[in-house]
Image (cartoon, coloured by chain):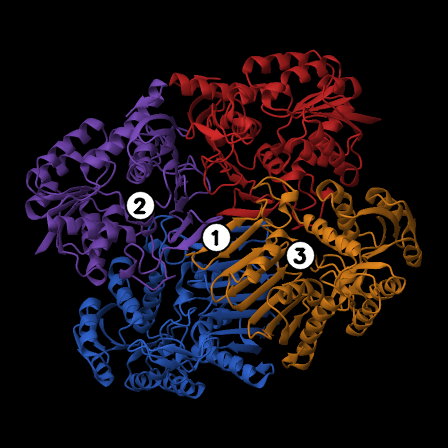
Chain colours: A purple, B blue, C red, D orange
Amino acid sequence: MTYDVGFVGYGLMGKAHANALARLPMFFPDAPATNRRIIAGRDEDALARAAERYGFDRTTTEWRDVIDEVDVLYNLTPNDLHPEPSIAALEAGVHVLCEKPLASTLDAAEEMVAAAANSAAQAACAFNYRYVPAVTLMKRLVEEGALGEIRHFRGTYLQDFQADPEDSWIWRNDADVAGYGRVGDVGAHTIDLARWLVGDVERVAGTLSRFVEERPHPDDGTPTPVTTDDAYGALLRFESGAQGVIEGSRVATGHKNTNAIEIIGTDGAVRYDVERFNELELRGADDRGFQRISVTEPSDPYMDAWWPAGHGIGWEHSFVHENYEFLTAVDAGEGYEPGFADAYAVQTVVDAIVESHENGSWTTV
Amino acid sequence: MTYDVGFVGYGLMGKAHANALARLPMFFPDAPATNRRIIAGRDEDALARAAERYGFDRTTTEWRDVIDEVDVLYNLTPNDLHPEPSIAALEAGVHVLCEKPLASTLDAAEEMVAAAANSAAQAACAFNYRYVPAVTLMKRLVEEGALGEIRHFRGTYLQDFQADPEDSWIWRNDADVAGYGRVGDVGAHTIDLARWLVGDVERVAGTLSRFVEERPHPDDGTPTPVTTDDAYGALLRFESGAQGVIEGSRVATGHKNTNAIEIIGTDGAVRYDVERFNELELRGADDRGFQRISVTEPSDPYMDAWWPAGHGIGWEHSFVHENYEFLTAVDAGEGYEPGFADAYAVQTVVDAIVESHENGSWTTV
Amino acid sequence: MTYDVGFVGYGLMGKAHANALARLPMFFPDAPATNRRIIAGRDEDALARAAERYGFDRTTTEWRDVIDEVDVLYNLTPNDLHPEPSIAALEAGVHVLCEKPLASTLDAAEEMVAAAANSAAQAACAFNYRYVPAVTLMKRLVEEGALGEIRHFRGTYLQDFQADPEDSWIWRNDADVAGYGRVGDVGAHTIDLARWLVGDVERVAGTLSRFVEERPHPDDGTPTPVTTDDAYGALLRFESGAQGVIEGSRVATGHKNTNAIEIIGTDGAVRYDVERFNELELRGADDRGFQRISVTEPSDPYMDAWWPAGHGIGWEHSFVHENYEFLTAVDAGEGYEPGFADAYAVQTVVDAIVESHENGSWTTV
Amino acid sequence: MTYDVGFVGYGLMGKAHANALARLPMFFPDAPATNRRIIAGRDEDALARAAERYGFDRTTTEWRDVIDEVDVLYNLTPNDLHPEPSIAALEAGVHVLCEKPLASTLDAAEEMVAAAANSAAQAACAFNYRYVPAVTLMKRLVEEGALGEIRHFRGTYLQDFQADPEDSWIWRNDADVAGYGRVGDVGAHTIDLARWLVGDVERVAGTLSRFVEERPHPDDGTPTPVTTDDAYGALLRFESGAQGVIEGSRVATGHKNTNAIEIIGTDGAVRYDVERFNELELRGADDRGFQRISVTEPSDPYMDAWWPAGHGIGWEHSFVHENYEFLTAVDAGEGYEPGFADAYAVQTVVDAIVESHENGSWTTV
């Protein structure tokens, strides 16, 4: 069958997912067919332009219209808008791919998990970095035991798009909308990878930093309060006993998208930085140092679909792979991972970090 | 108007250009519209599958059919098939994008240049690496004088896809088809960049290496003679007085696609390696060392069309940019660069390297 | 005058400091002259060999003999032996250079600070990494304001010399001798640099990990308990408001001596890894990316004493610079930094990390 | 016995070798003992300062005095002064370590080889880069067959100490003194490593570049002609059939001491850059990418003499190792390598490159 797909939201994530859907037929011909049917948003002009660019049949300013018309809903809205459309869709039997973090509060996230549990539809959360071939290969290496027992997880997600106090205010600066600052945005990615690759987190200590108290509004330059953190740091103790140290920032001058993780085990270690998208560094059991691997061989995850060895892909391709896996699961009617329950587990870690910051104590997840 | 496009050839380059055409509307909406109308090849089954994947309306085993039906011909065949369809198309007023090197012999290339000169249609040669944003930025830096007067050009293009003597025979191993070995294939890319970035080459010394004399045929494993070089090296003297040192190999163990160039001037230097696709290293006039630049800002060439800073693109995107520029020139009716004359100039350098190898002397281009 | 120097301890640090003293006359001819007079230790045979190699006049098994004979004492013993000889020397007016951490307990460290305060002699603590030219240059950059206001400090000190549970037991595994595990050994280095480069630490959260419970004794292979941590992680809040994230490990497979720090400010960032000894990465205010700087110019700290630009030095040279500064201060009679008070301040941070680990709460320093 | 050593020359090489001799007893206690007896030079004041710094008993302005007094002569003069003192010493049975290149003309070099052949004394040429542990390890890997059959040698030696036309004139700019420009100075190093690691060179093509015609004299700023090349490039064909591409420059903006080589074989590849002194990159037969190896383990060449793993050494240490090997050979009375014959073989390649440049043809070595 051909799945009718609807988006709520048409910003960066709308562009990334629309592109992913458009590219599946040529590169993953066994992916279920989709029809980009309807896209919802507030600003009718911008929406119309987006619909044309992204190849949607029609637009709406009412997200409920989307649910009525589609088989699959992509919820690409700011965090506080994740629950209501997602829950409504699941209640209507419509599959959902919701952007991360799951919600702007843990309570809302819990309601979403409940809705997912009560629905036969797939409820997916869009942690796209699992679908970077180098990261998927990391998972394969961990599962094969190439690293032995994991002792250290190190994760950073450093950016500088708000390093300058004069950088415009964005919705991610607003606690009411975003719920969290860096810890909920990039921290959620790091924590999802930590849980996926190393296992459950038992307890955390965390700290949040706000370096800029207000920023000019993009519309008129009005100083607007920043109510979310600019940076976070956290210590993790995994259930396995492994130690984790993670941090994230939007004011880390010199870093564009340093989403980097390292996993160190008894027998080996592996590390990756999204800025060198196609490169994985592996120190195998018999190696004297880290091998710099070009994750572009046909035997590497997803790479047989693309180009010859050494001809790398980019950030957007992680969305293609994510959509491929999601739609395949939708078609199979079987549990996509990471689902809402995984995303909720991530959010409990995020919340525990915030709580640790506020209470000044280690917090059990 | 919407341009009808036809491909001759459906291999890797077919895939790369079909993808490029498919992506233009979403990312470069001002690009002329195209219709993937017809694709030609020999093997009907494979062709039919390619046509479906790549989105062509119909197939043919006669390349002349393509010329009859289209406004633009993409000649994506092995080198010895470049001249005839390209010339026929140009004579028919059909625009041509021909893969590099221009032809398998310099004489044939000369005929192609003549046909281009006599036609009002665009005659483009597909040197896609000019359209890598980091490389386009290099050009901008050179033109702005950021490097001062150029003294050194260094270029390598190292791969290992035939490092093992048991790697299958391919048409690039056949002198009758390919005309040249590494010097014509990857050497042509390096020389095109050298000419574009530094200027005309006055004379060369060259050497060719053949390390493997025969390889198993992919069909039945029959030992099949290798009649082209596995590797080349050359010294260049530019008209400006600059010194160039270049080399290429398909047996360079450990290298997947090390297409790397460095330009050193009196005031600065810049270097780039395709394997780190989004990274440019620049040593500016006031710098103490090379800056590692993420060429992903909206102000970087072509990058405003794609993703936020730090969210890199991949090899295939160079084809999108190339197609964008080519089709824009087709629509404008104005001279695309690099055209057949540029490609011919590249080939004269390639030929001079071969001649130097054979004669044992420096050769004037 | 020529200073008589005595060592207590003849292990790795004995070798490093003896070499440093031996090299001063040739490379820093304005350094005060020294005479390596006496060296103390327990094992008479090993001591005799060390004395010959390191150029000492005579040996003793009584550390008190050293104090009687010298102007300057180098206390290069395990941590629990730092206080008594150091205090005795200071009371006798003998200058002291004591290895880090200052002591195996905070109480003992406090007594050492008191002794230093009551003595006219210099009381130095051997944080040699301050004297790596790239690190000294970092300090210069911070002080010149090249980075603006500091927001992030990131420090790791990863090694794998005990990654294998079969690696021999060493005194650093014994809490009674070492006092602390990684946090006191490599953590002390990281924290000293943090304080020097960013300022005082206000509060911390910390965690300690012990992955291996016993190790074979080097003498006979007897399983011997490990009573110190194999790894630590900590969050720092500086008095300035900056955020710090640090960690250290002796079981970090693949890392030999990854003593790496990064400082990120409003205007720039700088980072350094001891494993690439002569390289500093600087992202200045006008740069698009990190410059990779070869800290080997005559204008770089200490480098005019050595070799031409690009001809790098090694780890041992940090000790030469340290000894140069220490002896110069001894000769001037003026306060060397870092002294015992600085080392004590470092140790309060170390202790707070341990306390946070034990209490499960953020701890004020 | 203790060997009396005399230097002719007290510049950079005097400093490097004096330091090496001074360090041997502490780190290589089995090295033959030496006495720095006499040092010769022209400028009496500078010479006196050097003698004091470098630890020589006395000075002379007559190099013949040195030969009369010593067992071992270090000839550290500009190239045109290599032959006479070296030959005189060898005729007197005095061992010689002569700096590279062997002489400023091939004829003079030939006379030196003859003198060496007729003398029982050791005649060594100071190609110190063979004694960098990472390079010695490269040799070990090649000999063990870890790379298989060698196909490619790539060598660059890029510096920028004369990138600016206003950089002072030095004796290396004078053809009468230096004999050669870059090709004889840094080219000799690269060619020595090429021959040592890959084997004899059969024929070459070469090019020389002079970008700056005159430079200010250091004494008074007088414009002084530059009569040697600023840069060279060359293609090598080894007797084994391997292909070599090498180049060197003193005007390569952004490069301080990029003495880098790569050897690519059928089974593996290895590469090294002196600027990252302790790092070797190895792509072994079973590896997917280059391993970055810290050549600091006790099992690595010469490294058991120094510091623990991960605590790297610097450029000067290559001279310590060189002196250790040289003096050990002197003491054993057995053939040190590389000797004058090796250095002559290097010079024949250098000369062939110059000849190729002048004649415009490939030149047989």
Location of mark 2 (residue)? A139
Do discs 1 and 3 belong to a common subunit?
yes
Name the chain letter of the residue that bears numbered label 3.
D
Q: Judging from the image, what secondary structure is the residue with disc 3 in?
A: helix
Q: Judging from the image, what secondary structure is the residue with disc 1 in?
A: strand
Do discs 3 and 2 belong to a common subunit?
no
Closest to the observer: B225 or D211?
B225
Name the chain letter of the residue that bears numbered label 2.
A
Image x and y of residue C43, in percent: 68, 26
* Above-or-below relation of D134 to D55: below
Left or right relative to C42: residue C199: left
Q: Earlier in the sequence, mark 1 or mark 3?
A: 3
Locate the N terminus of chain C by quadrant.
top right
Q: Is residue A103 visible?
A: no
Q: Residue at x 31, y 70 (%)?
A: B12
Amino acid type, label 1? Gln
Q: Which mark, residue B257?
A: none
Location of mark 3 (residue)? D129
Cβ atoms at labels 3 and 2 below 8 Å apart: no
Q: Quadrant of residue D138?
A: bottom right
Location of mark 1 (residue)? D291
Left or right relative to D26: residue B115: left
Q: Is residue D306 visible?
A: yes
Between marks 3 and 2, how big is the CA–CA gap? Answer: 42 Å
Q: Residue at x 37, y 47 (%)?
A: A274
Name the chain letter of the residue that bears numbered label 1.
D
